[in-house]
Image (cartoon, coloured by chain):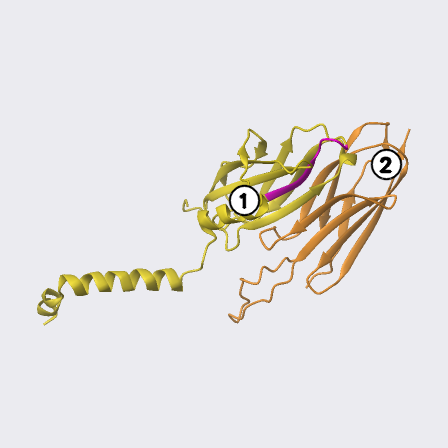
Amino acid sequence: MKTIKMIKISRRNAIALMLGTAGYIMSSGIAFAGKEQVLKRINEITKGKGAKELDIFLDLPEIAENGNQVKVNFEIESEMTKENYIKNVYILADGNPAPDVAKFSFTPDMGMCSATTRIRLSKTQNVVLVAENNKNEYFMTKSKVKVTIGGCGG
Amino acid sequence: MSKVKPRGKVPKKATIDEVIEIKTLIRHPMHSGRMKDKDGKNIPRQIINSFKVDFEGKEIFKMKLEPSISTNPYIAFPYKAKKTGTFNFEWKDDSGNTYTMKRKMTVS
């Protein structure tokens, strides 16, 4: 009986079934931020101006064994004077449930623009850094982190 | 829940115009609101959402934290020593608790 039933599925039905399954998987699984949402956030942060890709020192491990504690360190070359300094730095991740990770606000008193923290990464993904200076110019860089889950490879 | 305890490392002495590194760590579970407990119930979101540092009443560094920050948030940042004074660190969490810490630094 089973085989006969399977043959009876028409092409139209098969397509409908496939679409239905895909929709189910998408709606039932945990929603991840995705690249589109990160791009949307960058657009929001830069107020539509967009960010210039720049070679910023963003130190992240290439492979993170434990996605719960991933050390992030960045350093942006800046004079850090009242006339020219980095005001805000945003860290975004495209594979986490929400795109935002952290926002740092710097002042010229700090002498240099750098910071370190530890973040959570739920899977292999890109970590994006967006920097804003006091002249409202935006720069960005990104780094891919491979996250190993349970030692099985991600 | 273990007690929330802030910790910080600031050099006691610095020379003028020296860029020092300040390291802070606060013990906090940082529940993202997506984890479940042993009975399968959702643990409500409870995170440290902001961190602020003042030096002699002037704000020098601020950070906004999201659920993607690890348990026991560690934050390190630089500061250019200009004068002797006290750093005031302040963490705030979702339930409105504030945790503060003070550190002195002598500049010669």
* In-front residue for pair A12/A51: A51
Say which quadrant the N terminus of chain B sits in. bottom right
Q: The orange chain is which one?
A: B
Discs 2/1, front: 1
> Is-magenta flag for residue B23?
no
Name chain A's colour. Answer: yellow
Q: Is B98 positioned to the left or the right of B73 in the image?
A: right
Residue position marked by numbered label 1 in the rendering: A48
Q: Give the range drawn in magenta.
A: A82-90
The answer to whether residue A83 is above or below residue A125 is: above
Disc 2: host chain: B
Residue B65 appears at what percent x and percent y?
A: 65, 51
The answer to whether residue B103 is above or below residue A31 is: above
Q: Is A11 positioned to the left or the right of A102 in the image?
A: left
Q: What number is the disc on residue B12?
A: 2
Say which quadrant the C terminus of chain B sits in. top right
Q: Is B16 positioned to the left or the right of B71 in the image?
A: right
Q: What number is the disc on residue A139?
A: none
* In-front residue for pair A49/B2: A49
